[in-house]
Image (cartoon, rainbow, N blue to C red):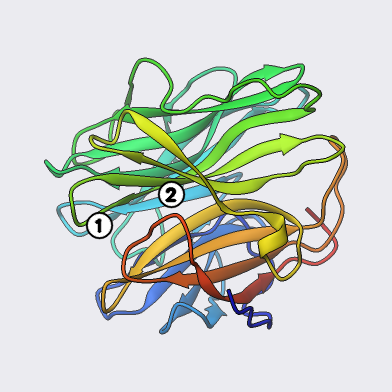
């Protein structure tokens, strides 16, 4: 891995990237007052767009294409701000992603917490929604779950069981899996990148992957990116992968200094690395910092 350092876009976390009809990319992320966006022609340099794509309390957007050409955005919104947190998933639609209809409606409630969604198209064209479910407060435990829907993405019906759940880690203040991103592979399988939460006095979050034949039963492959393998050597979250020309893929992730549970600190930045020819577990190269959020987690 050969790091290439340089800020690309400020104030970006939990980013979702979609391809536009003209070949450019639009990155969606939570911002002041709602969901904001940035445009890129090369998947490296992102120029912020003015205004908001969706106005209102919202976080962790997932944007997917519908058969009629519109885009559906699924996002999380808190229903309780005190601990333990409570959040459910809402959705809205847009003709081209530049402006979404206001007043999104609730689409999935999995108490007490369902958020950080990601939508993947299955072999039959139907969407499957993956999301983070908050399982326990003492210690914090997150698992990954899924739901199915029609092409239009309404409504969503939760599938039984967990897609991934953590094995216990002694002494961990926070543990589990979160921030799923599922990539359909050319051979028909599905690879999931996710954050592995292990917050102890000696460990911190890292990016792992899992593989599946059907998008439902996943087998953990292991670590694909640890803090030691990044330019900032710090806590890692929010992986997201996109296809590039010539059978390559680029994976994005967010890096932030280590923190203690219940505190916020540091200057998180969003990095990218490139892998070819398929989005496999190892040998991701050419790290670039393209987003930095100063003075906050």
Residue 68 appears in the rendering? yes
Q: Quadrant of residue 125?
A: top left
Disc marking residue 97: none
Q: CA distance from mark 1 to mark 2?
A: 14 Å
Residue 101 appears in the rendering? no
Which residue corresponds to mark 1?
70
Q: Position of residue 159 (x, y in %)?
A: 33, 20
- Observer-side mark, 1 or 2, equals 2
Q: Secondary structure at mark 1?
A: loop
Question: How would you rate the neighbour count of disc 2 (Cα within 10 Å): few for under 14, some for 14-19, many for 20 or more?
Answer: many
Residue beneath the point at 85% across and 62% down: 295
Residue beneath the point at 53% across and 35% down: 115
Q: Position of residue 235 (x, y in %)?
A: 73, 52
Question: How would you rate the neighbour count of disc 1 (Cα within 10 Å): few for under 14, some for 14-19, many for 20 or more?
Answer: some
Which residue corresponds to mark 2?
62
Residue beneath the point at 41% across and 84% down: 41
204 left or right of 291?
A: right
Q: Residue furthest left?
A: 124
Quarter of the rendering occupied by the N terminus: bottom right
Task: Name the residue nearer the viewer: 235 or 76.
Answer: 235
Residue 288 in the image: above or below residue 213: below
Q: Secondary structure at mark 2?
A: strand
15 left or right of 79?
A: left
């Amino acid at each position: 891995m050969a790091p290439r350092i340089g800020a690309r876009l400020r104030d970006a976390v939990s980013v979702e990237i979609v391809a536009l009809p003209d070949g450019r990319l639009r990155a969606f992320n939570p911002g002041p007052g709602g969901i904001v966006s940035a445009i890129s022609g090369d998947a490296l340099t992102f120029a912020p767009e003015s205004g908001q794509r969706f106005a209102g309390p919202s976080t962790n957007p997932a944007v997917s294409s519908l058969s009629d050409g519109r885009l559906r955005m699924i996002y999380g919104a808190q229903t309780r701000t005190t601990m333990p947190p409570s959040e459910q998933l809402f959705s809205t639609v847009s003709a081209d992603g530049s402006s979404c209809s206001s007043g999104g409606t609730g689409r999935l409630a999995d108490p007490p917490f369902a958020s950080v969604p990601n939508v993947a198209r299955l072999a039959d064209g139907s969407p499957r929604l993956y999301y983070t479910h908050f399982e326990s407060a003492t210690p914090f435990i997150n698992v990954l779950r899924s739901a199915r829907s029609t092409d239009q993405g309404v409504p969503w019906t939760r599938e039984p069981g967990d897609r991934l759940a953590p094995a216990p880690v002694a002494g961990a203040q926070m543990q589990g899996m979160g921030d799923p991103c599922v990539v359909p592979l050319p051979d028909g399988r599905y690879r999931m990148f996710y954050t592995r939460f292990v917050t102890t006095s000696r460990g911190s979050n890292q990016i792992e992957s899992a593989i599946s034949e059907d998008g439902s039963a996943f087998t953990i492959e292991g670590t694909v990116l640890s803090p030691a393998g990044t330019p900032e050597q710090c806590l890692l979250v929010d992986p997201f992968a996109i296809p590039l020309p010539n059978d390559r893929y680029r994976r994005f992730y967010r890096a932030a200094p280590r923190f203690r549970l219940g505190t916020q600190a540091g200057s998180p930045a969003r990095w990218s690395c490139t892998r070819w020819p398929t989005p496999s577990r190892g040998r991701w190269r050419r790290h670039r910092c393209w987003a930095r959020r100063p003075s906050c987690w």
